[in-house]
Image (tube, rainbow, N blue to C red):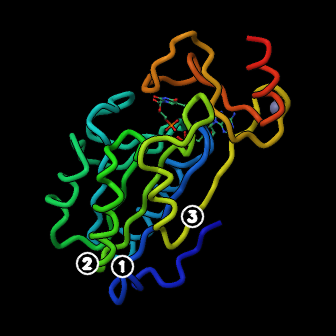
Amino acid sequence: MFIERDVNSHKKQGSIEVVTGSMFSGKTEELIRRLKRAKFAKQKVEIYKPAIDVRYSETEVVSHDENAIRSTPVENSANILLLSGNVDVVGIDEAQFFDKGLTDVVVKLANMGVRVIVAGLDMNFKGEPFGPMPEIMSVADYVSKVHAICMRCGSIAQFSHRTSEKEQVVLLGEKEVYEPLCRSCYLKTKKAQ
Ligand SMILES: Nc1ncnc2c1ncn2[C@@H]1O[C@H](COP(=O)(O)OP(=O)(O)O)[C@@H](O)[C@H]1O
Ligand SMILES: Cc1cn([C@H]2C[C@H](O)[C@@H](COP(=O)(O)O)O2)c(=O)[nH]c1=O
Ligand SMILES: [Zn+2]
């Protein structure tokens, strides 16, 4: 489990943390856990998500287990910078859906002394890097890769397999459209398609 060296350390120096993995791997729960701890430490916390992600709520980040935290939906990464004056900690969920400018935004925030925590899918359903996530992982101070459980064999899963035939990269959905799979089950399933 990720433990902050010092919840207040960003006051001396900003930082970038990334929580990544497949769908159902616990990214949002981990993001909420870290942000709630920052709130207990009386820090000013702001949470953003892309405006397109309205699956559970327009104004909350919600995990698959229905843990929730208030959030601001934003149209693009530049808005995050505009809205984050005087903030100690910035949380960003579903970061894969943001534009490539998100990398610059998180670096600028960290350089201003902000602790930035980014959660997002590392790969799309094709197993390819997703949106700005690869760049953000490379500039991050800390990267936590979390895993789901494979729905076919019970191993550790890192792929988000799409069970529908739709081909566009962005397709919002839950268990009706996606299942987490391990490498071996993902490859077998793709071969059989
Ligand atoms: N196959 C699975 N493997 C692990 N967790 C699962 C699975 N299916 C459902 N879950 C639930 O999803 C929760 C994680 O939800 P969440 O934090 O929203 O994940 P993510 O943001 O990575 O999609 C787990 O605590 C668990 O209760
Ligand atoms: C793999 C994949 C996922 N999506 C969508 C599906 C969900 O709406 C989100 C991921 O949510 P989670 O919090 O990580 O469970 O992303 C997509 O649009 N395209 C994909 O390839
Ligand atoms: Zn498997």
Q: Is residue 147 left or right of residue 3?
A: right
> Is the CB–ligand 1 distance for label 3 below 8 Å?
no
The answer to which of marks 1 and 3 sits earlier in the sequence is: 1
Q: Can you tell which quarter of the image residue 9 is in?
A: bottom left
The answer to which of marks 2 and 1 sits earlier in the sequence is: 1
Image location of residue 182, percent across then percent down: 77, 36
Q: Nearer the viewer, residue 179 or 61?
A: 179
Q: Nearer the viewer, residue 130 or 30?
A: 130
Q: Count neighbours of disc 3 (C-alpha within 10 A) and say few if under 14, some if 14 to 19, many if 20 or more.
A: some
Numbered label attached to residue 143: 3
User: Which residue is identified by label 1?
Assistant: 14
Numbered label attached to residue 112: 2
> Is the CB–ligand 1 distance for label 2 below 8 Å?
no
C-beta proximity under 8 Å, tags 2 and 1? yes
Q: Amino acid at mark 2?
A: Met
Q: Can you tell which quarter of the image residue 39 is in?
A: bottom left
Q: Report the residue at 60% width, 23% height from top.
A: 178
How far is disc 2 from disc 3 in space, using C-alphas? 20 Å
Q: Count neighbours of disc 2 (C-alpha within 10 A) and say few if under 14, some if 14 to 19, many if 20 or more.
A: some
